[in-house]
Structures are given as structure tokens and as C-alpha cells.
Amino acid sequence: MLLDRLIAFFTSLKLTVVCLTLAMFLVFFGTLAQVELGLYKAQNEFFRSFLVYWGPKGADWKVPVFPGGYLVGGVLLINLISGHIKRFGFSTKKVGLWLAHAGLILLLVGQLLTDMLSVESGMHLRVGDTKNYSEVERRAELAVADVSDAKLDKVVAIPQSLLARQSDVTHPALPFTLRVKRFMANSAMANRKPGTADPPAATHGFGPQVSVKEMPHVTEMEKRDIPTAIVEIVTPQGSLGTWCVSEFFDEPQRVMVGGQAWTLTLRPHRDYKPYSLKLLDFRHDVYPGTQIPKNFSSRVQLHNPQSGEKREVLIYMNNPLRYAGETYYQSGFDPDNQGSILQVVRNPGWLTPYLACVMVSAGLIIHFLMHLVQFLAKRKPV
């Protein structure tokens, strides 16, 4: 029967060996691919995918050539669960084995949750600054803000994934259509001199003063892509022209639509919090007579209006702030020692590896002790 064949296939020890072999090759080739693709892109293409795709350089097509991390891990998880149920009936004598296998299953599931749900971002604070958001530098968003009210800005954030489609973007809060003419995930920009042959990037805002070109994906760990987009604002009355929006620009670009003032800003994706952090002081201590860092720490004030909580926290190496499901690590600082960079990690499954290791260890110890007791009980007195 087909069901019997499926059960035999998924419970086979040969499938276990094949999955482990594929996992080793996947780690090997994925590590080599980091040289060309960079760490983050290699992780997404090899380990956070069901299939690994390949295509000739410059071609717009790719074919699957190898199982990805999700597929190998998923099949291995099914094999582990089904094989254990088939071979080990539940009994008190095998409680150690069940506990150890449950720990292995939790380890695989926990890694999947980490890949799918964890988010890393950063918060850059100068002394005296207060922020209620962190920024995901490797994801951009186009913030379209209604600034006609001096007291309140109404912002529509368009994610990078939508900009990359290079199509029309509409929103109920926008009285116009945003037509994405071109999106460059990485770009280079230069000042455009009058009379030069280089075409202007756009017709309005900073566009006439600059020229822009698309660049290859950055693979170095210490660098990142700088995205740029060319967008056109289209009203029911017609087009108002094009604007060049880029993370190269520090200032927003102002647009007047129907008597209302709007701004366009391409920025790193913001992850807003229901609380805020204020940097009160930053210290960077070095060993006397050297430039070797001894300690760097940030003294921040945490304020949560919803709970009324307001307290000071000291964040330093190996002493992060854990709050509301997020962890704040001391990551870096500004050269003038007046600014601090905090790495913000939200990982709902951060406890699963620790719990899984405890379960596996406890299961093996229990299984060993039970066999030891049985062995000692069978020994005959001399």
C-alpha cells in the first residue's frame, strides 16, 4: 500500500543518513557562497529556503539544483519523529530516550522559529536623544509624510519589497499614486555638474543635482547596500514629475500636492516600540597608556507610558537590557564618545536551545542511570 511505503520511507535510517549528508554539503557550499553573496544573502538562499537555485551569471532565470535548509531540516524532523514512534514504544524504561529525542525535536523546531521570527535591528542614540524605534539597516522603506499639520505628521511607510516591484503604489491616506519608475537595491551617487552629459536622476527635489547608477550587491560584512528609487507622483489631474529618493540623502524632500505639504524619505525600516529609551551618558574607558578598550557602556532611561514605568538602566558588554521580548546589546559607539549604538534582537525562541540541551542531557543521564541500576541489581554478591 502507498501508506505503508510512505511510512517505511520516512522512518528509514537510510533517509537519516541522506539528510545528514545533504546537510553537510549544504553547510559546505553555503559557506563558500558567502564569498560572492555575503553572509545574509547566502543564509537566505541556502539555509532559509526550501530549494537552492542556480542560473548563469547575467541570466534572468534560475533552476533548483539542491535542497535548501528548510527542506532538509523538515524531512529530518519528520524522520526523527516517525522513526522514534515506530521503534520505541513508550514505557518507563525508555523515558530517558524519549526525553533526549524530544530535546532534539525541540532544537530543530526552535531553530526554525528563530529563522522565521527573529529580527535584528539597531538603535543609534546621541547623548540626550530619545527614541521609540530601532532601524533594520538591511531593509529600506519609503516614508511619505503629511507635514501640513505642525503638531502631527501622518506617515505612510512603503516597504522595500513593494518598491522592488516597480509598479504603482496606492494607499487610502495618499491623495496621489506613487509610481515606482526604477528601484536599485544598491546604488552609487555623484553630484551632477552643469552641462555634463550624465542625465539627471529626476526632475524635482534633489534629482536635477545628482546622477545615480545601479551597483552590484555588497558582500562585505562591514558594508551594506544603499538603495535608491526613482518615483513619479501622479494625481487625478496628471503627473507632477519624478523624484529621486535614496538613503544617500539625510534630509526629506518636500512636495506640494493639492495645497498639502508632503515629504519623501527613503530610510532604513523602522520598528516602533510602545516605550522609549533616552541616552543619559556614554562611557568608553581604555587601559592607561593604550587605546585598548577596557569598557564601554550606555546609561539609558527607559520610559513606558502605558505601564508608567520610568527607570535607569546600565547597558554594557555581557550585560544587555532585556525588556518586552527584546534584548539590547552594547554594539558600538561614535568616535567622539557622545553617541552609542545598541543592537536590538527580538527572538521569541531564544530559550529553546537552552531547554533542548537540558532535555537531551537529562534524557541521556536518566537512560544511563537506569541501565546502571539494572546492571548493579543483576550482579551476584561475592
Image: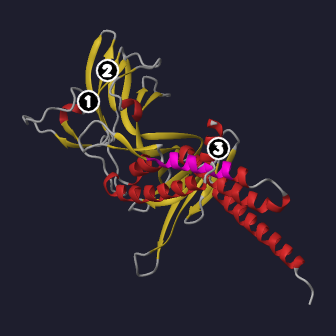
Mark earlier in primary sequence (1, 3): 3
Q: Which mark is residue 233?
A: 2
Q: Position of residue 29 (x, y in %)?
A: 39, 57
Q: Could you tell me which secondary element the residue under label 3 belongs to?
A: helix
Q: Position of residue 23 (x, y in %)?
A: 49, 56
Mark 1 Cα shell of 10 Å, populated few (<14), some (14-19), many (≥20)? some
Mark earlier in primary sequence (2, 1): 1
Q: Which residue is mark 3?
A: 7
Q: Which residue is mark 1?
A: 205
Q: Position of residue 222 (x, y in %)?
A: 36, 57
- At label 3, the amino acid type is Ile
Q: CA distance from mark 1 to mark 3?
A: 64 Å
Q: Nearer the viewer, mark 2 or mark 3?
A: 3
Q: Does the residue at mark 2 contact the one at mark 3 (Cβ under 8 Å)?
A: no
Extent of the magenta region: 67-83
Q: Could you tell me which secondary element the residue under label 1 belongs to?
A: loop
Q: CA distance from mark 2 to mark 1?
A: 12 Å
